[in-house]
């Protein structure tokens, strides 16, 4: 499932992130690429030792954790520290690749189930730079307004097409979900959204709403692996 979510960060947060990004130290994206990705990766990203990075990560993580759609769709057990990347000039594309399934962190290994990209540049400010996600039946080209986010399963091949004018700055991150299987996350998300609609129409006290809410939580209890 691909899900786009608008206005994940507000205007003040976007302005702050842009200002910090302008001060940060950028390095070649090859610093964190695995052997397959290194062949096709041609972008820049904020260096781990850049002092602005911690505050930028905090802004993004706060925004994710307060967003009910992100929580419902991704059901994150852990969100890895976000990265920030930049495409433009001669370093302007990231060819088709898959992301590593397992990420090593200081606290141990984390399984990457859900990828998220938060767009920070205004789409009018650059040409190209679509995030193309290769799904089973179609390729989806995603280019969102600044402050909007796309969530998609890490299992999918994806790429960023060349930026031929201007500059595209974005933030991306990986999450380990409480529910490993994308199909199960999809079912839980659909049910959660339908329940929100039913509650609005029938009220919290409605007996059927209550029973279906119980089914949602019991499915989550069956499927969630919080490690
Ligand atoms: Ni990737």
Image: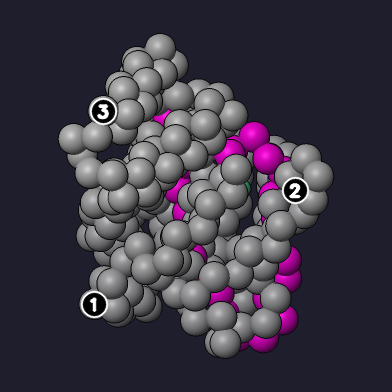
Where's residue 122, x and y in %? Answer: 49, 81
x, y percent for residue 163: 68, 75
Q: Is mark 2 within 8 Å of ligand 1?
A: no
Q: Quadrant of the N terminus?
A: top right
For label 3, the residue is: 207
Residue picked out by circle 1: 12
User: In front here: 118 or 29?
Assistant: 118
| Residues in magenta, as a range | 153-177
**What label does residue 134 carry, if any?**
2
Total marks in image:
3
Instruction: Give the main secondary structure of the magenta stretch.
Output: strand
Residue 5 placed where, x, y %? 45, 60
Helix, strand or loop at mark 2: strand
Left or right placement of residue 155 versus residue 176 in this view: right
Residue 164 visible in this rendered orientation of the protein: yes
The question of residue 195 being in magenta is answered with no
Residue 76 quadrant: top left
């Amino acid at each position: 499932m691909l899900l786009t979510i608008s206005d994940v960060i507000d205007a003040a947060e976007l302005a702050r992130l842009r200002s910090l990004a302008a001060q940060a130290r950028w390095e070649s994206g090859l610093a964190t690429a695995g052997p397959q990705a290194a062949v096709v990766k041609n972008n820049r990203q904020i260096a781990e030792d850049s002092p602005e990075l911690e505050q930028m990560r905090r802004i993004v993580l706060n925004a994710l954790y307060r967003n009910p759609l992100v929580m419902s769709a991704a059901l994150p057990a852990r969100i890895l520290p976000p990265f920030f990347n930049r495409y433009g000039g001669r370093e302007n594309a990231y060819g088709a690749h898959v992301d590593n399934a397992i990420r090593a962190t200081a606290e141990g290994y984390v399984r990457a189930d859900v990828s998220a990209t938060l767009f920070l540049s205004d789409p009018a400010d650059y040409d190209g730079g679509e995030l193309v996600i290769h799904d089973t039946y179609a390729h989806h080209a995603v280019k969102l307004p600044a402050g909007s986010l796309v969530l998609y399963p890490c299992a999918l091949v994806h790429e960023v097409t060349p930026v031929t004018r201007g500059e595209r700055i974005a933030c991306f991150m990986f999450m380990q979900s409480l529910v490993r299987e994308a199909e199960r996350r999809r079912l839980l998300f659909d049910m959660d959204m339908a329940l929100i609609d039913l509650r609005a129409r029938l009220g919290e006290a409605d007996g059927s709403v209550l029973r279906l809410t119980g089914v949602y939580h019991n499915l989550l209890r069956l499927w969630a692996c919080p490690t």
